[in-house]
Amino acid sequence: MSPEQHRVGDQPWVRRSLIGLAVSLTVILLVIPVVVIFTEALSAGWSTFSDNILDEYSLHAIGLTLLVALLTVPLNLVFGTALAWAVTRFRFPGRKLLITLIDIPFAVSPVVAGLLYLLLYGRNGWLGGWLSSHDVQLMFAWPGIVMVTVFVTCPFVARELIPLMQQQGSEEEEAGVVLGASGWRIFRKITLPNIKWALIYGVVLTNARAVGEFGAVSVVSGNVRGQTNTLPLHVELLYQDYNVAGAFAAASLLAAIAILTLIAKAIVEWRQSRIEHPAPKTGGA
Amino acid sequence: MSVSAQAGAAPVRRFAGRSKRVLPGFGLSLGISLFFVSLVLLLPLTGLVVETSGMTWDQFVFTITDPRVVESYKVTLWTALAASLFNGLFGLLLAWVLVRYEFPGKRLIDAVVDLPFALPTAVAGITLATLFAQNGWYGQVLAKAGIEVAFTPLGIVVAMAFTSIPFVVRTVQPVLEELSPADEEAAVSLGASDSRVFRKVIFPSLWPALVTGIALSFTRSLGEFGAIIFIAGNTPYVSEVTSLMIFVRLQEYDYAAASAIASMVLLVSLVLLFAINLWQGRYLRRLEGR
């Protein structure tokens, strides 16, 4: 397997044209759109940009979006970790089905997701009717937004953890059991250090999607400015009001979060590869 | 992304012949998982069942075969197909270039591939609409060639393609990485042409991952909403996708009609989901030689 051996596509002209084509398409399809978000946001100058961001409704949308993320992420962190532990550390009937079921939110249209919640918890739904007779309103209010966001983002943590935990196996944890450690201690001292980076990336992805969810939220929100408007919905409202600079100003905040997400992913992959191919002394347990 | 991570996972360690559960936390972790799956994923389905069961069969059929809705199925299907096939080619190219070659900026390209998953769809929507508008950077150039993208079904293809770019790249990439150079080098040294080696040696191990990536991309495109509505123009009978039809019926407070259409969409996406998972399981086993 010497590197001098000829492999397919090694001729300089093939190489150059494939790289050229891939890079230019990536720039056209992925890089320039990001550039456009920021140039449009700043097209009317910095002061208009900051006015757009510091506008009363924008600030409210930012606050609501943060609240949604703050409630969604911990819930899905606990669920994702528990699910990954259950399906990678034990064999039980229905295990495969469970793994498939958690992909439902990836397959289902966000609009359908929103509709499902609206039908169940809305005033005419069988559960919603009972709730509203007790003066609990979930739909067209912030709790509904949180609920659909939990639905839409629930696979991310589990999906990051399952392949990794399956690959790592459970020998180290079994050794912990033999040595008499408690379950919680095994998880904290053995499992957590091994899955730390995947867990962080799962959280980052959950957060990115929670902050940016549009379709499902727009079905259950009611879009009331200053009340149930999240940042993505605010982007839509401003855009439809022909306030393009305002829409892109709000969008640039979301794009910044997206870019941070990509950076986080790069860092996590780098750290994870150090765990898997450790320098001497840091490995093993 | 996460879905695709499965495709390239290293051979899974077998827990052969384990009869007793050694590790603690089975009850707790499975309990939390089942509670959550039932409450968050399964319970909401009951609302849809209740709503649609309130309709007669004729009403149901009438609603889902309404000409405007049928037109939206057609538009959604062909645009999703076009977008996922484009991503099949583009994704294969990107994966190939990222695995096989070294060049400056490679890590940046690799990182930016995931952008569509990180960027909120509404942001993608207004950005693409701005770029492809008649006076936009791309729209101007395309207008000279007589191509209109914004406010046409072509805009839907662009939006779908953008939001599902990562799927094929991330399913094909790990398979390409694992490919042993030995067969390929042997074939090349025996004098086979590059294109022949690619067709006969490389592609046969690649295509299951490629199909998975295209299927994931197709599924995602069928359900896409946020990115599309800004660029599609949403003209009835021309550029309305099915997700939007559900939304329109909801805004008319016609919950029954929205549910009927949604149940069709849900059925298709669940069938696709189970088919993809079955397919992935089968070819993963084959790759591991079991």
Image (cartoon, coloured by chain):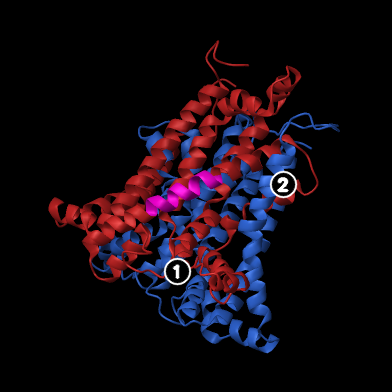
Chain colours: A red, B blue
Stretch of the chain drawn in magenta: A65-76
- The amino acid type of the residue labelled 2 equals Gly
Q: Is residue A68 magenta?
A: yes
Residue tagged 1: A140
Q: Farthest front residue?
A: A134
Q: Is residue A82 left or right of residue A139?
A: right
Mark 2 neighbour class, 10 Å CA radius: few under 14, some 14 to 19, many 20 or more: some
What's the residue at 80%, 32% (across, down)? B21
Question: Do the residues bearing badges 2 and 1 touch, measured as CB atoms within 8 Å?
Answer: no
What's the residue at 44%, 39% (across, down)? A14
Q: Name the foreground residue: B152 vs B244.
A: B244
Q: Is residue B108 left or right of residue B81?
A: left
Q: Is residue B54 left or right of residue B66?
A: right
* Relative to A92, residue B54 above or below: below
Q: Name the foreground residue: A42 vs B131.
A: A42
* Relative to B11, residue B70 above or below: below
Magenta stretch, main secondary structure class: helix
